[in-house]
Image: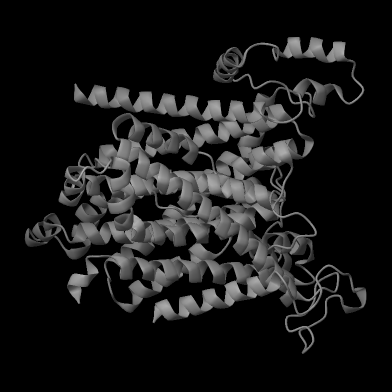
Amino acid sequence: MRLWWSALVLAVLLIGALVAAFWTPHAIDGVAIANRFASPSRQFPLGTDQYGRDTLSMLMAGGATSLGVAAAATIIGVGAGSVLGLMGVAFGGLGDGAVMRISDVVFAFPALIVAALLATAFGPGSINAVIAIGIFNIPVFARLSAASARRYFQLEFADAARLAGKSEVRIAAEHVAPNIAPIIATQAATQFAVAILAEAGLSYVGLGAQPPQVSWGRMLAESQTLVPIAPQLAIWPGIAITISVFAVTAFGETLRVRLDPRRTFEA
Amino acid sequence: MWRLKAFLKRVGVLAATLIGASLLIFLAMNVLPGDPAEVLLGMNASPEAIASLRAEMGLDRSLPLQFADFVGRALVGDFGVSATYGVPVIDLLAERASVSVPLAVLSVVLSVMFALPAGLYAATRRGRPADRAVEIGAQVGLSIPNVWLGLMLVFVFAVTLKIAPAGGFPGWGAGVLPALGALLLPAVSLAAPQAAILTRIVRAAVAEAMDEDYVALARAKGLSHAQAVRRHALANAWSPIVTIIGLQFGFLVAGAIVIETVFSLPGLGRLLFQGVAQRDLAVVQGVVLVLVATVIVVNSLCDAVADWRDPRRRAAIPPLASP
């Protein structure tokens, strides 16, 4: 049940964002002062903002940025993090220790601080947001994959593979990785949700998406001074973020329960 | 004896992590395009003037030497002089910390004050509607971006009801109550996601502890249900709770930076953004160093407390990520 509604909400959000990359109901780069602060109508289902831009179109375009940045940052974390963690364990001893210590150090850098450092160097932007959140995600997956991989290297099938002459790296790739994939997938859902929130924060403070690129975080920032006269402009992007994070987390939780191998015994 | 050894090991790991983090910050500041001396002197400076300033700033030395110097100075609180403010960075940090530290403490206190009763309530009613309600509430709390919560709180309490300031900080000189009043809405926005995470952790930890034999034994010995929960289940649940507070601290710091912007509070986060906007390298470096070091130290402290509360704890708890 929960799997279905969360998957449905996710699908709607992702399709909306994908479509917005090519088409939105109204143009979002123009200014139409005559339409400013329009109430919801058939033409503008959610009304318009201070420049007369259609709020629904803005939300769709913002979703493309926000979800795109979050997805890219999660992929960086999963890719680099789980490979590092797995290889650390495969090489054992010093390799494992080094990966864990470096993870500890990097974990102390909130994405926002990495983004601030990157912005000082290269100026702010969505790419920097991706890198900053991605860097923050790497130790999360490195630690998790190492922690869950360790015991598999000691099981009989790993010994059997060793007897068959496979290297530790091959054992990691062929035998351990498939076993830890479910837990990584579950964490990826959580981190995707975290990344949506982080992107919103970064764009809000001006370290993420830059004008004219639209993002949910920037919509919040732009509507802040208008809250007394047009609170709906701040309410919509907030609802979009909340629903996305809620649906992604719910989807992840369901995934966790479904993918838990112990659950097969219950049935 | 092993206690001393464990303590020394902990201090060693802490020191190594701090040095690793400062190395990362140092390297990040050094690979920045643009020479700090050129930035300071402006476009029209003569090459001689730049060279002499570089020598004065020690930029002509080897990187390892510069790093040693950087760490040595940081240890005695010398973070250089701000290019935009013209005052030592440490003075700026101290001034801004007088806003950020109380904000962080207030939000941790608020989140614990909420999470403990809520988590306990849910844990003692497992599977019942009240438990489900708390779980859904926590899930919603986790999903709401704190920037947005801040904006909505301003809309309700400052714009509509007019019972709280919309932002700004009167300074501690204006009295403790007005200052705390200015920090209350920001602290609530900051505390909400923390409270949501903590509630789930408290619930899970207490629920797990309640299944232990010692709780059944306490009940058999005649303790009431409430007493058994309080004295045994909660007492044993502290360790994971403290660990999570530590792990969450980095998010709290990041959240505080954003929330300070929402409420225009003159804290460390705003100082960081001013530094980024003005390319004031000394300020950026100082703020980042202090914030990251704080995260590392708090993490380590919470870890130590958790170990002390529960000596059985050996393996690290996998990172429970959250905003």
Image quadrant for the N terminus of chain B? top left
Q: Above or below — where is A22 with respect to B298?
A: below
Total labels drawn: 0
For this view, does B209 lie left or right of residue A99?
A: left
Q: Residue at x 67, y 74 (%)?
A: A19
Residue B153: % across, % down: 64, 63
Residue B247 in the figure: left or right of residue A192: left
Furthest toward the front, the residue is A165
Residue at 34% over, 35% down = A96
Is residue B317 among what the camera can see? Answer: no
Residue B125 lies, in percent from the top left, at: 28, 71
In the rendered image, residue A221, in percent from the top left (x then y), is placed at: 73, 59
Q: Is residue A212 above or below residue A93?
A: below
In the figure, residue B34 lies in which quadrant? top right
Compared across the picture, whether B1 is left or right of B220 comes to right
Q: Nearer the viewer, residue B236 or A41?
A: A41
Q: Can residue A125 be seen at all in this image of the molecule?
A: yes
Q: Which of these two is toward me, B263 or A165?
A: A165
Query: On screen, B121 above or below A38?
Result: above
Give the answer, above or below, for where B316 lies relative to A22. above
Residue B3 placement (x, y as % from top left): 23, 26
Residue that sits furthest to the bottom in the current view: A42
Measuring 46% from the left and 80% from the top, which residue is drawn there? A5
Q: Which color mode does the image show?
A: one colour
